[in-house]
């Protein structure tokens, strides 16, 4: 392992209140960051080629009373090495290793992009423990991108935001080979959350950017019209809501959790 990676893994990245923990795997280790608190636990999962640092702005606006757990996928941040022959289901099992290590009986879970997909997968596998799910542009299927958004991903990013996004990605990609990157890009295309969304009664918050265009219907998003699934749009934003609208994402997530907890806001 390079000195650069070793140095990275010793850093907390999110501030002194966070503690980095690692779980040993058959090959390598799995890393997550914990901000301890007595209130409900909210597990967050960054998107593809993003480490915990990518969610820093969202975290900065979340209630400090929430216990936060930020899980870094294999090959991302302090987790190493990159995955091989993996899947959304396998990433979900990794997250549940953290849940079991922490002995969490109940928790909220959310994530951006592939992190949102994994959050939904965890809800499918462990519904008795999940109190609510926040999916931040976590597409139900890869068909959503062309059907709902004509393939648009980052059309609303400013030049500064695009540079910031690339900087965040390079924190991960600089340690990967091209083959590892291409393999990882296949994982989310093999997953479909349609059956779970149609069958579950878990509270779910779906957050989407409307790309500054006419908003597609739920059928194109593959999100069923159900009382337990709240779809909220962020106007004039696109896929990278953690960069474009972190304060709004944090507020919506906090309101969602507070409502379930019965506290109101």
Image (tube, helix red, strand yellow):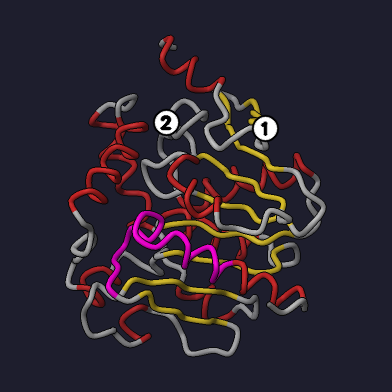
Residue 161's place in the image compared with 101, above or below, is below
Q: Which residue is mark 1?
A: 19
- Closest to the observer: 168 or 112? 168
Q: Which secondary structure dominates the residues rendered in magenta? A: helix
Residue at the image position 60 percent from the left and 47 percent from the top: 93
> To which quarter of the image does residue 261 belong?
bottom right
Is 134 situated left or right of 261 in this image?
left
Residue named by callout 2? 82
Answer above or below: position of 135 versus 218: above
Residue at the image position 37 percent from the left and 85 percent from the top: 218
Is 236 situated left or right of 138 in this image?
A: left
Residue at the image position 38 percent from the left and 66 percent from the top:
139
Graded by Cα atoms within 10 Å as few (under 14), some (14 to 19) or many (20 or more), the crowding at tag 2 reads some
Is residue 5 or residue 160 the one in the foreground? 160
**Residue 236: percent from left, percent from top:** 27, 73
> Is residue 22 within the magenta segment?
no
Instruction: State the SS at label 2.
Output: loop
SS type, badge 1: strand
């Amino acid at each position: 392992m390079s000195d650069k990676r070793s140095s990275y893994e010793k850093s907390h990245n999110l501030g002194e209140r966070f503690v980095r923990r690692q779980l040993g795997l058959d090959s390598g280790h799995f890393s997550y960051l914990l901000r301890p608190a007595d209130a409900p636990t909210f597990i967050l999962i960054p998107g593809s080629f993003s480490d915990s640092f990518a969610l820093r702005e969202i975290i900065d606006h979340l209630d400090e009373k929430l216990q936060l757990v930020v899980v870094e996928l294999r090959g991302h941040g302090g987790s190493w090495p990159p995955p091989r022959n993996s899947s959304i289901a396998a990433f979900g099992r990794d997250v549940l290793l953290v849940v079991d290590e922490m002995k969490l009986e109940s928790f909220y879970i959310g994530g951006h992009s592939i992190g949102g997909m994994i959050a939904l997968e965890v809800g499918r596998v462990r519904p008795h423990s999940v109190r609510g799910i926040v999916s931040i542009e976590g597409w139900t299927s890869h068909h959503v991108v062309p059907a709902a958004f004509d393939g648009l991903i980052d059309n609303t990013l400013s030049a500064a935001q695009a540079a910031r996004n690339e900087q965040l990605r390079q924190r991960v990609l600089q340690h990967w080979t091209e083959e590892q990157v291409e393999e990882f890009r296949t994982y989310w295309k093999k997953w479909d959350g349609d059956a779970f969304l149609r069958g579950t009664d878990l509270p779910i918050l779906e957050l989407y950017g409307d790309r500054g265009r006419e908003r597609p219907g739920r059928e194109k998003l593959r999100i069923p019209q159900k009382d337990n699934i709240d779809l909220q749009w962020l106007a004039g934003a696109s896929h990278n809501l953690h960069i474009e609208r972190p304060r709004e994402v944090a507020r919506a997530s906090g309101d969602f959790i507070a409502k379930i907890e019965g506290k109101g806001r």
